Amino acid sequence: MSGKEGGTGHIIQSLIVNGLIASAKGVAAFFTGSGAMLAEAIHSAADCGNQLLLLRGVKEGKKPADATHPLGYGRNVYFWSFMVALLLFSGGGMFSIYEGVHKLQHPEAVENVMLAVLILGFSLLLEGWATLGNVKELNKRRGAKKFFAFLKDTKDSDLVVVFGENSAAVLGLALALTAILVAHFTGDPRADAVGTILVGLVLVGVAVFLAVEVKSLLVGESADPEISTAVHRLAGEDPRILSVGQCVTMQQGPGEVVVAIKIRCEPHVTAKDVSALINEFESRLRSARPECRYVFVEPDLSMAPVQVQAVAS
């Protein structure tokens, strides 16, 4: 991660797109009686609620530190991202599977197929556009890191959640469109029911992936290994620092990292010199890695010269 805090543009873009799509799908579901279309309408409506939760999380995460939360409120983003994953699992995935099973047991003919195809095609274009915007944002932030490696390692949970939602929406729309066409041309409405179940399974799979990724951040995950690398590099450039005994990092929120360091100094330095050294080192680290918002350095004159790297996230 570059250390820059992500904006909310990608969330607002997805919110607007899903609002339009949910309305269109709802109308199509009413006129066609398609279970797959209803599942997609509910999915898009749920996504709108999810994006509102993400916006709340981003807003709350930017609150300044205070006496009750001395390290700030950055983890609010992770909490609301986890809530989104839970809602996507229950409100989107499980309901779609239930609706598909119900339609499979009680098949109903799909009507006004042309209307459904037009709306699904329109929705697919909009969702594809929103997903492309997410991919561009991911590419902007990942730098030289490979795409899927960045997706797994990034601490920007809001971006991962929105990308996961939009990707699931694109795949779900493709499945729903295929299911309706198969049901129409074969005359078997059970194909539509199967499509509804498949849409639900896609949503459940994405929700589980997001929950696992965000849970690690919510519990307290170490920051990017590049932070520890920067600490050791900067320490090595200062002749007054003999070694870094321990470097513990923790991601406190998007663009916010806590760093606790123990350093071994030259034995002859005075307390005043150590204080100046620490202040200078903290300034250099924050300059090199702006996301290191909370830095704690402890000197140890008796520490053995053994370097311990931070655990990679």
Image (cartoon, rainbow, N blue to C red):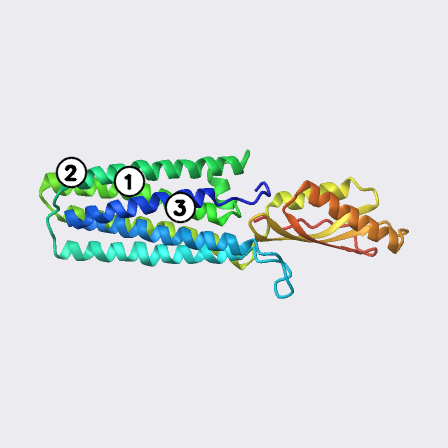
Q: Which mark is residue 294?
A: none
Residue contact between numbered discs 1 and 3, judged by CB atoms under 8 Å: no
Q: Nearer the viewer, residue 68 or 296?
A: 68
Q: State whether residue 182 is above or below residue 39.
A: above
How far across and how far down the image is residue 225, in percent? Answer: 61, 45
How far across and how far down the image is residue 240, in percent? Answer: 84, 45
Residue contact between numbered discs 2 and 1, judged by CB atoms under 8 Å: no
For disc 2, the marked residue is 114
Q: Amino acid at mark 2?
A: Met
Q: Residue drawn at (26%, 49%), measured in percent from left and top?
A: 41
Q: Is residue 59 left or right of residue 205?
A: right
Q: Residue drawn at (10%, 48%), measured in percent from left and top?
A: 109
Say which label, 1 or 3, has the lower sequence index: 1
Instruction: Assess disc 3: are there few (<14), some (14-19) or many (≥20) residues with their C-alpha within 10 Å of its C-alpha.
Output: many
Q: State whether residue 15 is above or below residue 65.
A: above
Q: Nearer the viewer, residue 84 or 247?
A: 84
For disc 3, the marked residue is 164
Q: Is residue 308 left or right of residue 162?
A: right
Asked whether residue 194 appears in the rendered view, the answer is: no
Q: Amino acid at mark 3?
A: Gly
Asked whether residue 60 appears in the rendered view, the answer is: yes
Q: Secondary structure at mark 3?
A: helix
Q: Amino acid at mark 1?
A: Ser
Say which label, 2 or 1, has the lower sequence index: 2
Say which label, 2 or 3, has the lower sequence index: 2
Q: Residue drawn at (19%, 42%), measured in percent from left and top?
A: 116
Q: Secondary structure at mark 1?
A: helix
Mark 2 to mark 1: distance in Å?
Answer: 14 Å
Instruction: Assess disc 1: are there few (<14), some (14-19) or many (≥20) residues with their C-alpha within 10 Å of its C-alpha.
Output: many
